[in-house]
Amino acid sequence: MTQPDPRVFAESVRALLNEDVRRYRNFGVYWFAVKAVLKRYFDRNEMPILGNYVAESVVSRMPEGLDMGDVLAAAAGEYQENASFNLGRNRLSDPSGEFFTLIDPDVEG
């Protein structure tokens, strides 16, 4: 699988979230990693949702040992899966099949 360029990935995610900010949920366990990548390229003036909130209980569900390219590729795959089948819900499953709730107060106010 081709690994996404972080800048191109961030610009694409920004465009998706500008259309509907609730789409962040589609990234599942990878959301806070995606948020960190967005913060490398954009500030809160450009994307007000980029606060400092991180749910460690969600981050800990990410598979271990992934490099940045692997994380971005997995995040893109997770987004596609959830956009197709989860329909924007914030109750998601992690890679081991366990369910969790994803809420980011920086996004949802």
Image (cartoon, helix red, strand yellow):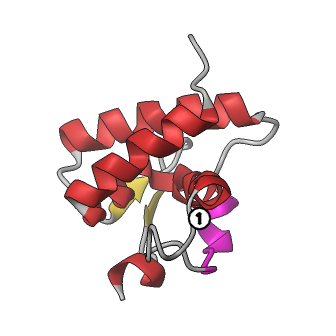
Residue toward you, 75 or 96: 75
Q: Residue at x 64, y 70 (%)?
A: 57
Q: Could you tell me residue 12's position as x and y percent?
A: 40, 39
**Residue 40 visible (yes or no):** yes
**Residue 89 visible (yes or no):** no
Residue toward you, 65 or 15: 15
> Which residue in the rendered view is the most extreme toward the bottom?
109
Q: Could you tell me residue 55's position as x and y percent?
A: 61, 74
Q: Could you tell me residue 76's position as x and y percent?
A: 45, 34
Left or right: where does residue 23 sit relative to residue 73?
A: left
Left or right: where does residue 86 sit relative to residue 10?
A: left
| Quarter location, residue 48 | bottom left
> Where is 77 relative to 58, above or below?
above
Left or right: where does residue 60 sit relative to residue 74?
A: right
Residue 57 falls within the magenta-colored stretch: yes
| Quarter location, residue 101 | bottom left
> Where is 63 relative to 28, above or below?
above
Q: Considering the numbered disc 1 on the image, is that residue within a helix, a strand or a loop?
A: helix
Return the residue at label 1.
58
**Which three-letter amino acid code belongs to the residue tagged 1?**
Val
> Which residue in the rendered view is the most extreme toward the top?
1
- Magenta stretch in the rendered image: 52-60
Q: Residue at x 58, y 38 (%)?
A: 7
Residue toward you, 88 or 100: 88
Please state, as top left, top right, bottom left or bottom right, where the N terminus lies in the image. top right
> Which residue in the rendered view is the most extreme toward the front?
45
> Where is 17 relative to 71, above or below?
below
Residue 37 falls within the magenta-colored stretch: no
Residue toward you, 10 or 84: 10
Q: Residue at x 56, y 60 (%)?
A: 42
Judge the density around disc 1: few (<14), some (14-19), many (≥20) Cα neighbours within 10 Å. some
